Image: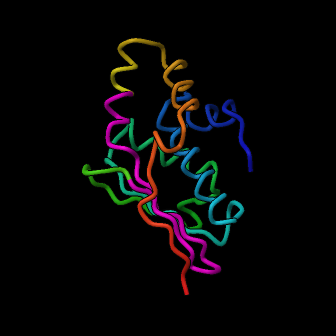
Amino acid sequence: MKLSLEEAEKFHGHLGPYLVIGMRIGEYAMEQLGITPYFDLKVEVECPPKPPVRCLVDGLQLVTGATYGKANILVKEQNKHVRVKITNTKNNREIQIELHPDIPIKIERWYQEMSEKKVVQNILAMDTRELFQIVKNQVGE
């Protein structure tokens, strides 16, 4: 399910950097796990309780198709880090991805220097290794 940025903006209300980060994390994880959206997956997110960082949850929902109604997305509020675990529920293979801790600082600085559109372009241009790191990549039994 490849969504356009316009579709994401329409769903979320604006095209912010954390929405795009959530989309990028979701796309990367699903590709690594070999899964398609909506079913046979579970998404667990650890993040701050308020926007803007929490906006990545909307990006994850858009890309993975996980929803609160299907009970296949869970958000645990905390302020230490931003971590996403996506599990293929058919084979228990999972991947855990953590946002690099310097990304919120970069985003805040960029907002002082440029428009939101340019901040989003910077996020889209970043290599995945600059944006996040794999904390765990495991195949279940």
Quadrant where the C terminus is found in the figure = bottom right
Q: Position of residue 23 (x, y in %)?
A: 58, 44
At x 45%, y 46%, the residue is 132
Determine which quarter of the picture holds residue 6.
top right
Residue furthest out toward the left: 80
Query: As displayed, is residue 109 above or below residue 83?
Result: above
Q: Position of residue 41 (x, y in %)?
A: 60, 69
At x 40%, y 47%, the residue is 99
| 80, 128: nearer the viewer | 128
At x 59%, y 67%, the residue is 70
Query: As displayed, is residue 67 above or below residue 104?
Result: below
Whether residue 14 is visible here, answered yes or no, is yes
Q: How many marks?
A: 0
| 57, 112: nearer the viewer | 112
Q: In the image, is 18 to the left or to the right of 23?
A: left
Q: Position of residue 24 (x, y in %)?
A: 57, 44
Q: Position of residue 112 (x, y in %)?
A: 35, 14
Whether residue 71 is visible here, answered yes or no, is no
Is 57 within the magenta? no
Is 95 within the magenta? yes
Q: In the image, is 79 to the left or to the right of 121?
A: left
Residue furthest out toward the right: 1
At x 27%, y 54%, the residue is 78
How is the rendered protein coloured?
A: rainbow
Determine which quarter of the picture holds residue 66.
bottom right
The span picked out in magenta is 83-106
Q: In the image, is 40 to the left or to the right of 19?
A: right
